[in-house]
Amino acid sequence: MVQSATGGYDGSMLNGLNILPSYTDYFNLNAATTGLNTASVFIGGFFGPMFAGVMSDRLGRRPTIFWGCLMMLVGILLQTAAQNIAMFVIARIILGFGQQVSAIAAAVYLSETFPSRWRAWGVGLLNDFYYVGALLAAGITLGTGQWQSTWAWRAPSLFQGIFSLLCIVILPFVPESPRWLVHEGHFNDARTVVATTNANGDVSDPVVVTIYKEIVDTLEWEKKEGRTMSPKEIYKTPVARKRLLIGMSPGPFSCIAGNIIASYYLGSELDTAGVTNSNDQLKANVVLNVWCLGCCLIGTHMVAKWGRKPTALLSECLLVVCLFVIGGLSKIYADDPDGASQSLVYGDVAVMFLFQGFYSIAWTPLLYLYPPEVMNYSIRANGLAFSSFMLNALACILVFVMPIGLTNIGWKMYMINGSWDIVCVVLIAVYWVETKGKTLEEIDAIFEGEKHSSVPDVETVRKGEATVDVAQIEHELHDEKVALKEE
């Protein structure tokens, strides 16, 4: 959560900086260089996933988060000290690289460590904290925006490092993923983590024994099937390819949904609506992030109670409606800006805010929640890395193109974006599967046709609908541990 706030802080900070004359004048920015300065974080984000999956599998989830945070700190310091566009861009590439490494490891870690009944909140809050960082950045840039020096933009940049420092301080006090521990042969440590997160440390609790047996059985099955931790595993079999395509879809879908315009170019977006005063735009940035934080928390509740697929469909349909309405209102304003009524301006801004809220309901929690749920252990880290790779590849292009598009075709950009979202609605409706209420191992049954463990589903044990013979399972676990160690 601490880590994800860095991403939100970055988007909101750049939103504020792109409005500040002290920043745009210092670098002498035009549409192309504004796009480059902003999109450079996605260049790093493009390369980060290439290493994040392998690092998470080999080093462990926690060490990978640490190294990602360390890289972010280096990028933040260089960004704060930037003397020219080249230095600023290089700093943001390093920042984006580290951000993706730690984000991917953090999402996999949380999905593998949280109990299934709390996983939606545990992993969903990871990206929800994007808006905590965004809100802080919006407030800081609003405060420093009145300073008559380069510290008007350097100070917000420096404060960005607080989140990475906090993450590094907290890491020694949290356990490693139990799935990773079992895979690496640290069985007792893994069982202790499962007991800590599910039964206050009671290793003999039936729920703990059931979860632990599922993990051991499933990883033993994967090893017997010849599943390795190679990145090639993500496309090796038809089932792996299906899981990859469904699991990685939140990355590109959330990227092309349309929020990039408001996430990085709120000033330009508000210009098209008639709000041109830079101070008013900074205030709008603060209000927008408060609104989005509330919406993503509501969305996380919906994802937990209603399900992943229904929430995504509702949100995406609302985004289509909003984009076409924004495009229409912006066209009316563009046709006659001098004769536009105040109600038209306020109406356009209101729908822009609704759009960001509807986006936050589904895509904020689902971006890092859904992919690791859909993918099995051998492809989980590399599959999520591929999802992030696709997101950043698209974002790298769109963040650079958006200011040019808004400058040249204005309201038509919203219409184009709305058309993309209609395609996304169809793909979600046809191909997505529901994962609510299942452990990561139980989701295998949706794709493989069967669960690879003989124990009942965890929730049935937790609710008392099924019982397990703890002594018998203990005996089976002893034999499986011996087999896994021999392999």
Image (tube, rainbow, N blue to C red):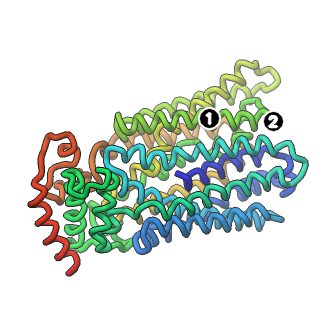
Left or right: 68 in relation to 468: right
Q: The C terminus appears in which quarter of the rendering?
A: bottom left
Is residue 316 something that shows in the picture?
no
Residue at the image point whose x is 78% and y is 32% from the top: 280
Residue 406 has which mark? Answer: none
Residue at the image point whose x is 61% and y is 52% from the top: 398
- Position of residue 354 relative to residue 389, above or below, is above
What percent of the width, then of the height, locates residue 355?
A: 57, 33
Is residue 463 something that shows in the picture?
yes
What percent of the width, then of the height, locates residue 356?
A: 58, 36
Disc 2: CA contacts within 10 A as few (<14), some (14-19) or many (>=20): some
Q: Which residue is mark 1?
A: 290
Residue at the image point whose x is 64% and y is 45% from the top: 134
Quadrant of residue 145 in the image? top right
Residue at disc 2, secondary structure:
helix
Along the viewing direction, whichever of 427 and 14 lies nearer the viewer? 14
* Nearest to N terminus: mark 1 or mark 2: 2
What percent of the width, then of the height, locates residue 171?
A: 50, 62
Along the viewing direction, whichever of 297 and 328 lies nearer the viewer? 297
Quadrant of residue 97 in the image? bottom right
Residue 279 has which mark? Answer: 2
Count of marks, rendered view:
2
Quadrant of residue 307 in the image? top left
Amino acid type assigned to the residue bearing label 2 in the image: Asn
Along the viewing direction, whichever of 414 and 2 lies nearer the viewer? 2
Residue at the image point whose x is 41% and y is 49% from the top: 369
Amino acid type assigned to the residue bearing label 1 in the image: Val
C-alpha distance separating marks 1 and 2: 17 Å
Viewer-side label of 1, 2:
1
What percent of the width, then of the height, locates residue 118?
A: 36, 45
